[in-house]
Image: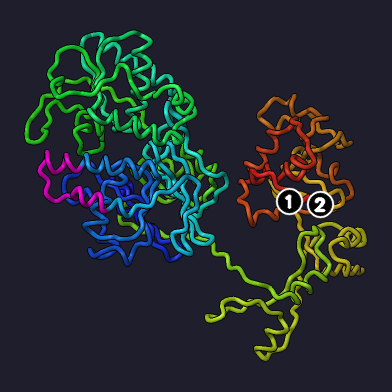
Amino acid sequence: IVPLGAGQDVGRSCILVTIGGKNVMLDCGMHMGYQDERRFPDFSYIGGGGKLNDYLTCVIISHFHLDHCGSLPHMSEIVGFDGPIYMTYPTKAIAPVLLEDYRKVQTEFRGDTNFFTSANIKACMKKVIAVDLHETVQVDSELSIRAFYAGHVLGAAMFEIRVGHQSILYTGDYNMTPDRHLGAARVLPGLRPDCLISESTYATTIRDSKRARERDFLRKVHDRVMAGGKVLIPVFALGRAQELCILLESYWERMDLKIPIYFSQGLAERANQYYRLFINWTNEKIKRTFVERNMFDFKHIKPLDKGYEEMPGAMVLFSTPGYCVAGTVGAKVISGMKKIEIEGKMHDINLAVEYMSFSAHADAKGIMQLIRVCQPRSVMFVHGEAAKMEFLKGKVEKEFRVPVLMPANGESVSIPGISILEVDVPQDIVQRCLDLDPTPSKKACPFSACLVMDKQNGLEVISCEAAASRLQLGLHTITLSQLVKSRSVVDWRALSEALSIHDTHLQHKQDGIELFHGEICVLPVKGDDNQASDKNHWAVYIGRHDGLPLVVHLSGGDGDFGKISGSTLDSLSNGPSGVLKACTAQVRCDPLLAVAGENLVRINNAHDIDHQPFPPRIVVERATLQLGSGNYNIFLNNCEHFVKWCRYGNRISGQ
């Protein structure tokens, strides 16, 4: 993975990913703070300055903001790329409009001659393939992509990129909380990509109450216009503009205010058209009211006419595009500069600046929430400042125990993926396996075979005898033994009787036991799933308290388990001890011996292969927090469901 833009920076998002031999470009944005070649990603990194057809499999655009799609016509038509470009239907509709608007500003007003043309934009958009949410699109025989709802702006999507068993989830910009016109970002729980590439714009911010921010915004706007002043609100033409327009429209109606509100001419009408066309991308309230009326047909908000600029008196003005990143006029105003040069002319700045965040980016809490939902094997932060990334990196590594990367632009990082090879096993080997006695768990059979890797024929499974014959070798058996010292006298007869369930060939001798096929597990670890073999009952081992080994388990009845003292229970939980002491509760804490009785207890963490377990501390916390709860259901919530939920977060059962 190599960031060509947005590596420890905000602007010109462009991430190059190589996965399973496929090269994919994620976003192709422009830096709004530069007017020279630095505004574009460094495409020479890919093709050495030539066309990109031989280097890129496809390009994916997450949403229509120019810092994510602004360089697309330059990349495809000037640098040169004829392959497929993927984006959602709303992004395909809106992106060319914003690109054309920005082209006009750069070429007609600023006289920039080194810029893409209208023809470039049209030619570029002909290469675009639109995708639906949750639709799996097969780019070629091996590479597939899938879009998930990202909130943020109309049409914004996260993309899963998959080759075989390796996958990446790229978020673009996203918002984990719903707003007045869009829903919250959502992905499939437990997606488990090899890497989550997440924006980190607000990596150190946890936002306050949205309602409190809205009240503060309305109060400040109201106070300023009632004092005869003007309010300038820099926003994107689509997204935050509609959010704040809905907010001011309802407030103006409620307060019966007559002070004019103006919006850039033409954009309001276009917004109506897009929201009507893509109503299924909005939140439920917008969908319901759209049948009766268009919420974007504003009564108090009018298009701005050039003649209004010098008009005296109070007004509210929405200004687009609203970029305030380093190098822009917005950033200079926010920093408190009193004189600013715009297009060769100096302007006095007579403004009181209030910085209020209505950004539709995920804050630190939202980023952590997404990581918790999709359970990636590693995380990469882009689209943010290095210091903020570093702060959140520490929190993520501590809580989720996964590696976190934050490469700078041009820095390449490699992430190990999981490769799963599928092979056919001959019937005679399968039958030989089935003819053997299964292990005590009844979930596996001993299996011995040889895997042959051949460049021409691929992978082949053959029996050990066949492999020995091909290699003209004989088969041999090696027996390994291990000496384990015991500090006390061992009752070998009693131990052999207990272990015979694992190995019927076990031999009891005067000074020990010979165990051929079994496994002995000593000293359970906190958070392990323990299974009493005779009862087939499951419990979570939570450690020793007052010298007593304890488990938490879900019981369908009021079994006669051991009673635990109040002091012991109090030490297990931060919650009220009264909940813990509920001896008849279906989720209980009992001594291990009281639950298992005479049965041999074995550790059964078999699902660790398929599911990422929580850290032991979290498993114990999840178990103890459920003490006193009920809801026992043999099919949906039995004892095994409970311990698997504590360990993995999923209710799994082999019963």
Q: Residue at horizontal 79%, vertical 74%?
A: 432
Classify residue 639 by image quadrant.
Answer: top right
Depth order, front residue of 108/42: 108
Is 398 placed above or below 340 here?
below
In the picture of the structure, the residue carrying the numbered disc 1 is 524
Residue lying at the far left in this picture: please name it: 345
Cβ atoms at labels 1 and 2 below 8 Å apart: yes
Label 1 vs label 2, nearer the camera: 2
Magenta span covers which residues? 103-123
The kind of secondary structure element at disc 1 is loop
Identify the amino acid type marked 2. Answer: Val
| 122 drawn magenta | yes
Residue 407: tell me if it is visible: no
Q: Position of residue 328 (x, y in %)?
A: 20, 36
Circle on res. 601: 2
Q: Residues within 10 Å of mark 2 (few under 14, many from 20)?
A: many
Q: Which label number is shown at residue 609?
A: none
**Dot 1 amino acid type:** Pro
Is residue 138 shown above or below 529? below
